[in-house]
Image (spheres, rainbow, N blue to C red):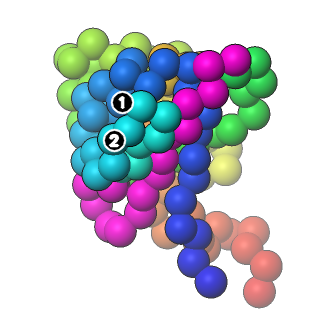
Amino acid sequence: MNLNQVTLPVRDMKAATDFYEKMGFNLIVDTPHYARFECPMGESTFSLALEPNLTHQGVVIYFEHPKLDDWVNELKRQGIEFDQMPTDQRYLWREAMLHDPSGNKIKLYWAGDNRLNPPWRKA
């Protein structure tokens, strides 16, 4: 089994689509109510679904990059605002945090081998 994608609810499709394109994702489906992106590395995709009356935020989406600090600095130069700059976490990941225009939480991170093989992994 493989995870196909995650779909995020958005209030404003144009603002959300522009935001994710600015972050470097490749737009492959673009309709007034749905958009789908390819990640620039690997084969993962994610999508956006228009929910104009969106009131609940419970999703956190993680995007991994081996040069996290460089990526974050490039995004800042493009005007993307961060709630947390790259920070080493107690669970051995380095993470930055931001929100998209609809309020969805995004974590940009690098975990290296600790992503799948942390010291506390079950055998």
Q: Measured from the top left, where is residue 11 in percent x and y?
A: 56, 20
**Residue at image location 47% in from the left, 51% down from the top:** 46
Give the label on residue 61, or none. none
* Picture layout, residue 13 above or below residue 120: above
Contact flag, marks 2 and 1 (Cβ < 8 Å): yes
- Could you tell me which quadrant the N terminus lies in? bottom right
The residue beneath circle 1 is 17
Q: Is residue 107 visible?
A: no
**Residue at image location 28% in from the left, 60% down from the top:** 41
Q: In the displayed structure, does residue 74 sit left or right of residue 44?
A: left
* Residue extent of the magenta highlight: 38-53
Q: Quarter-wise, where is residue 59 in the image? A: top right
Q: Quick one: label 2 or label 1, which is nearer the N terminus?
A: 1
In this rendering, the count of numbered labels is 2
Q: Measured from the top left, where is residue 102 in percent x and y?
A: 56, 20
Give the structural element (helix, strand or loop) at label 1: helix
Residue type highlighted by circle 1: Thr
> For the residue carrying disc 1, how many other residues have a C-alpha within 10 Å: few (<14), some (14-19), or many (20+)?
many
> For the residue carrying disc 2, how many other residues have a C-alpha within 10 Å: few (<14), some (14-19), or many (20+)?
some
The residue beneath circle 2 is 30
